[in-house]
Image (cartoon, grey):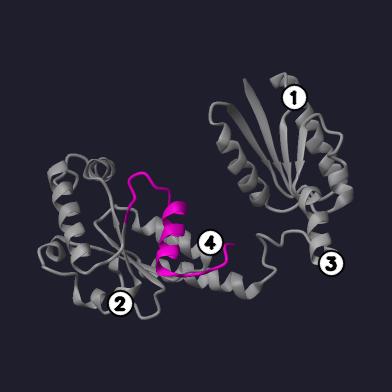
């Protein structure tokens, strides 16, 4: 049976969607149609949202699930009688938090994903710019890097660097090992100067071949033989210099980023 799920917020709805999606992954045998409704910041907009929930209930023949992170109690009140099962994160957690902390909340919209902390936002933008200007070995000046990802071409270095920059403000550079590098007994000298910051990414050769085939069909670059050679040679170099390594074959960028930060002891606030 298909169920509609609404993520409703007076801000971006990212928090509601992230929280709700995390819960829904525990019910992978069900079919969910997901609808995001951001910036529901007036009572009229909330009533319009409630109407959408009611229509979805009629179509599905079952009440939709509604995950809400609306701060304003008057606005959120307009959703309480909607024809869905409401999961209000603020109503659930704010009162217990006020009791534990001994202070009342100061309601403000959009704090989780806004620009409330301009310094933190600027740090993230600077880190993102750093990742872009130090992508694929563009620059070998890596003194300011927090982490340097090393691996063969198309092993997932760039998306992982950008994710760490955008979500953690991490200055992440990456370097693709070339055939010339792979013929050497150790990693390039300029990389070994930053050994504590190095982290290796590897991948199953079969998966790498599939990825490269989409980029350069029927090429030597994408051949399984070439992919096997590069992966084996790269892993040998990383082992020689004792660089911690993760496989990207079955891991998301979220998992990779979290494991890398944990391994390198980089404690950063998620944004």
Residue 7 vertical position relative to residue 265 in the rendered view, above or below: above
Disc 4 to disc 3, C-alpha distance: 31 Å
Q: Nearer the viewer, mark 2 or mark 4?
A: 2
Disc 4 to disc 1, C-alpha distance: 35 Å
* Residue named by callout 4: 167
The spot of residue 201 in percent (x, y) is 30, 57
**Camera-side residue of 19 and 154:** 19
Q: Residue at x 16, y 53 (%)?
A: 232
Task: Indicate the secondary structure of the residue bearing disc 3.
Answer: loop
Q: Earlier in the sequence, mark 3 or mark 2?
A: 3
* Residue named by callout 3: 102
**Camera-side residue of 105 and 118:** 105
> Which image quarter is the N terminus in?
top right
Q: Earlier in the sequence, mark 4 or mark 3?
A: 3
Task: Indicate the secondary structure of the residue bearing disc 1.
Answer: helix
* Residue named by callout 2: 194
Callout 4–callout 1 Cβ contact below 8 Å: no
Residues drawn in magenta: 246-271
Callout 3–callout 2 Cβ contact below 8 Å: no
Q: Residue at x 38, y 70 (%)?
A: 147
Disc 3 to disc 2, C-alpha distance: 46 Å
Q: Residues within 10 Å of mark 4 (few under 14, many from 20)?
A: some
Q: Nearer the viewer, mark 1 or mark 3?
A: 3
């Amino acid at each position: 049976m298909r169920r509609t799920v609404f993520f409703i917020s007076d801000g971006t709805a990212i928090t509601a969607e992230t929280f709700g999606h995390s819960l829904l992954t525990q019910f992978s045998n069900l079919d969910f149609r997901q609808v995001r409704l951001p910036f529901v910041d007036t009572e009229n907009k909330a009533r319009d949202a409630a109407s959408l929930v009611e229509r979805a209930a009629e179509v599905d023949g079952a009440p939709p699930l509604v995950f809400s992170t609306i701060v304003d109690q008057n606005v959120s009140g307009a959703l309480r009688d909607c024809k869905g099962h409401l999961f209000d994160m603020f109503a659930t957690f704010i009162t217990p938090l006020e009791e534990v902390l001994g202070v009342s909340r100061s309601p403000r919209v959009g704090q989780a994903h806004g620009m409330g902390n301009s310094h933190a936002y600027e740090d993230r933008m600077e880190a993102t710019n750093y990742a872009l200007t130090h992508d694929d070995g563009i620059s070998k000046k890596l003194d300011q890097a927090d982490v340097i990802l090393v691996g063969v071409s198309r092993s997932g270095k760039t998306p992982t660097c950008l994710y760490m920059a955008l979500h953690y403000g991490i200055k992440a550079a990456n370097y693709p090992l070339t055939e010339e590098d792979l013929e050497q007994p150790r990693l390039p000298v300029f990389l070994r100067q930053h050994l504590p910051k190095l982290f290796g990414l590897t991948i199953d050769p079969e998966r790498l071949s599939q990825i490269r085939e989409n980029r350069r069909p029927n090429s030597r670059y994408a051949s399984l033989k070439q992919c096997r050679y590069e992966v084996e040679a790269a892993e040998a170099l990383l082992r020689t210099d004792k660089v911690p390594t993760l496989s990207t074959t079955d891991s998301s960028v979220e998992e990779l980023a979290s494991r890398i930060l944990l391994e390198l002891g980089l404690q950063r606030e998620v944004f």
